Amino acid sequence: MYPMSVPVKLLSVATAVPPYKTSQRDAAMAAHQHFSARFADFERLAAVFETSGILTRHLVRPLDWYVQPMGWAERNSVYLQGACDLFVAAASKALDEAGVKAADVDTIVTVSSTGLATPSIEAQVGARMGFKTGVERVPVFGLGCAGGVSGLSIASRLAKARPGSTVLLVAVELCSIAFRLDKLTKENIVATALFSDGAAAAVVRAGEGGEAAIEMSGQYTWPDTIDIMGWSVDDPGLGVIFDRAIPPFAEANIAPALQAILATANLSLADIDRFVCHPGGAKVITALERALTLNQGTLEHERAVLADYGNMSAPTALFVLERTMKTGLSGRNLLTAMGPGFTASCVSLQRAA
């Protein structure tokens, strides 16, 4: 948590998705075909495909690929290829929009929690991108859905520490490789209805210009909540953990957490002109509107991103930010997300003068 006296500017935000676009209807049909006969409670849980607020999702492989038996090695191989391709697509677009060459990037923050890469993704695509040999690499793992917002906070701190240096943030997640036919659980069924793949990138620099000024940022981790969300690691691959219902937790707890973060910069919720939130699902968006005393329907960009792309984990909040910036930032905007920990992360942005 910190106020920022040196003006750190967000120069650009860009996004990318893999080529396989799948309708929610087709995903629901595939899930019914492969789960209904083996999971007694499937028909009741299948309603989440209808109530999720999702119309389409983008996946790194065709839908038929996910119903084949496979282990961790095959899943992670697909993660490596897909994550590298999405990194290049999102990063190249963000750098072009910022008018920055890859060779001029001083620091890269790479956020991803859906696969393993050693060396990390930015190193694997270094030659394709044209990064310089002296670029500083900061890979970040384990932040889940909060990763895009927390990553922007990290990038802004690094930019602040070295005014004039260029920091590239890339958040890339392939949630779909964790779809599991062997896990007959409520959490796994919900995951197949919500999650998808995508990447987002941002360019940050302390200095003049830019689309927005990054004013402050911070995190809040609730005690005794590590069981709310995360991954289990099994022989076939990663498995989703949802131990508690997130919408009621968000409605009851998010406002005090954000207020505590903002107070460190002598701000309050009343000082925020627009909230830009990670759309974890339709019920989560409604819970956030209630918690933040917003009129129902206020978070229209969040609902639109969820409908078009599903929940891509870390990049999703940056998809909402990109859409918000295209329609025009005004006043003070608070970018927020919740993720494993269980943690709320936020970044305050002001439209650049």
Image (cartoon, helix red, strand yellow):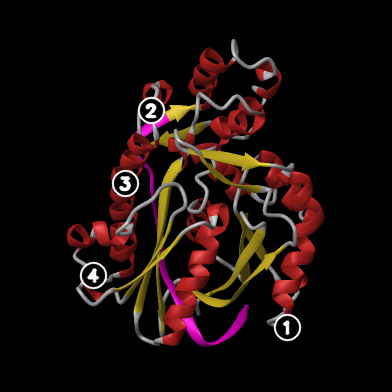
Instruction: Kindly state the secondary structure of the residue where label 3 is placed.
Output: helix
Is tag 3's residue or tag 1's residue first in the polypeptide sequence? 3
Residue 266 numbered mark, or none: 1
The residue beneath circle 3 is 80
Magenta stretch, main secondary structure, is strand
Residue 306 numbered mark, or none: none
Q: Which residue is drawn at 50% across and 76% down?
A: 352
Q: Residue at x 71, y 20 (%)?
A: 44
Check whether the beta carbons of the residues at disc 4 and disc 3 lie within 8 A of each other: no
Is tag 3's residue or tag 2's residue first in the polypeptide sequence? 2
**Above or below, 68 relative to 107:** above
In terms of depth relative to the viewer, which is nearer, 318 or 116?
116
Please provide the residue range marked out in magenta. Answer: 1-21
Residue 70 numbered mark, or none: 2
Which mark is nearer the camera, 3 or 2? 2
Residue 237 at x, y percent in the picture = 45, 37
Q: Which residue is drawn at 40% across and 87% down?
A: 163
Classify residue 292 as left or right of residue 12: right
Residue 16 at x, y percent in the picture = 37, 48
The residue beneath circle 4 is 101
Task: Give yes or no for residue 6 being in the magenta stretch.
Answer: yes
* Alpha carbons under labels 3 and 2: distance apart: 16 Å
